[in-house]
Amino acid sequence: MEVDHDVKRENIEFLVKEIMEDEEGKKKKEKALEWKKKAEEAVEVGGLSYIDFDRFFKEALKHG
């Protein structure tokens, strides 16, 4: 969710309630937790991002 720089307290209160209570908010929270888990797995040793960076680094050393 995005919040404008000139947001009012009532807007924040509505968004927080929506996330905590509303079914759509619960779905968004679940999806965010899924993405968080995927991101954490990707950067672990042996994760996809780790492997990609390792491959990039080895290629850079070959041509450096």
Image (cartoon, rainbow, N blue to C red):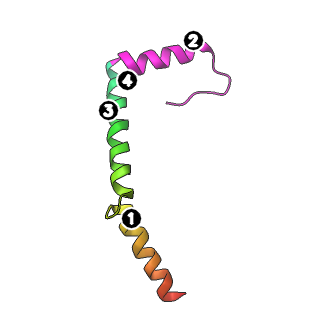
Amino acid type at mark 1: Tyr
Closer to the N terminus: mark 2 or mark 3?
Answer: 2
Q: Where are the magenta residues, as a range?
A: 1-22
The residue under the point 36% across, 58% down is 44
Q: Tell me, yes or no, whether the two marked residues, 3 and 4, touch with CB atoms within 8 Å.
A: no
The residue under the point 33% across, 45% down is 37
Percent across and percent down for residue 34 are 32, 41
Percent across and percent down for residue 9 are 60, 14
Closer to the N terminus: mark 3 or mark 1?
Answer: 3
Amino acid type at mark 2: Glu
Residue at the outermost front position: 45
Closer to the N terminus: mark 2 or mark 1?
Answer: 2
Closer to the N terminus: mark 3 or mark 4?
Answer: 4
The Cα–Cα distance between marks 4 and 2, rounded to whole angstroms, is 17 Å
Circle 3 sits on which residue? 30
Circle 2 sits on which residue? 10
Q: Examine the rendered structure and indicate whether residue 37 appears above or below residue 43.
A: above
The Cα–Cα distance between marks 4 and 1, rounded to whole angstroms, is 32 Å
Amino acid type at mark 4: Gly
Circle 1 sits on which residue? 50
